[in-house]
Image (spheres, rainbow, N blue to C red):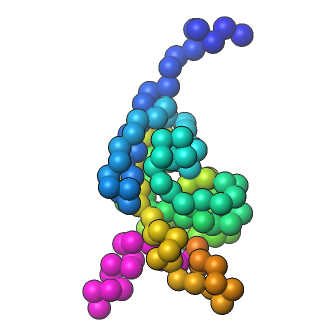
Amino acid sequence: MNYDDEEPQPLVTIVFLANDGKTIEVPAGSNLLRMSLRKQGGIPFKCGGGICGTCRCLLEEGAENTAAPTKKERNHISDEHLALGYRLACQTTLTGPLKVSWVPLEQRKKLPSGQPDHSTMGPRLLAKEGSS
């Protein structure tokens, strides 16, 4: 196989809103969490495999520029929250530009065990709750 003849992947832009708007360019088809790790985007993570839910984030703009949610995501995120743009970064493949935010681990509600509750609502919903 000759890789020199392959077309290079177009670059897409990711803006990490919860990391002071840090902006990077990555090849289309990239995984959101992997690119966050490689480029110090700041999305929190633990397992990286769709099991723990730690990398739950909100696609503020560009949700249409991602592959469909996976079964693992549907185990952690309700249809309602998926429709609002919530995803697991470890399960999200990029096809175009997006802007992403997340609630830092230290600001997430705690479970009785003292561990962060990764199902807690993200920034958009927290802002709405705080305004009432």
Report the side of 120 relative to 127 (left or right).
right
> Visible in this render: residue 104?
yes
Q: Viewer-proximal residue, 54 or 99?
A: 54
- The number of discs equals 0
**Is 126 contained in the magenta span?**
yes
Give the percent coordinates (x, y) of residue 93: 56, 45
Residue sitting at x 61%, y 53%: 90
What residue range appears in magenta?
A: 119-132
Horizontal and vertical percent for residue 18? 38, 60
Residue at horizontal 32%, vertical 55%?
A: 20
Residue 98's spot in the image, x, y percent? 39, 48
Depth check, front residue: 12 or 80 = 12
Quadrant showing the N terminus? top right
Residue 38 in percent (x, y) is at 54, 40
In this picture, is 39 found above or below 87? above
- Who is closer to the viewer here, 28 or 100? 100
Question: Which residue is drawn at the image coordinates 69% and 86% (left, top)?
Answer: 113
Q: Based on the displayed image, in which of its 4 quarters is residue 132 positioned?
A: bottom left
Say above or below: 89 vs 96: below
The structure residue drawn at horizontal position 68% and vertical position 66%, both measured from the top left corner, is 52
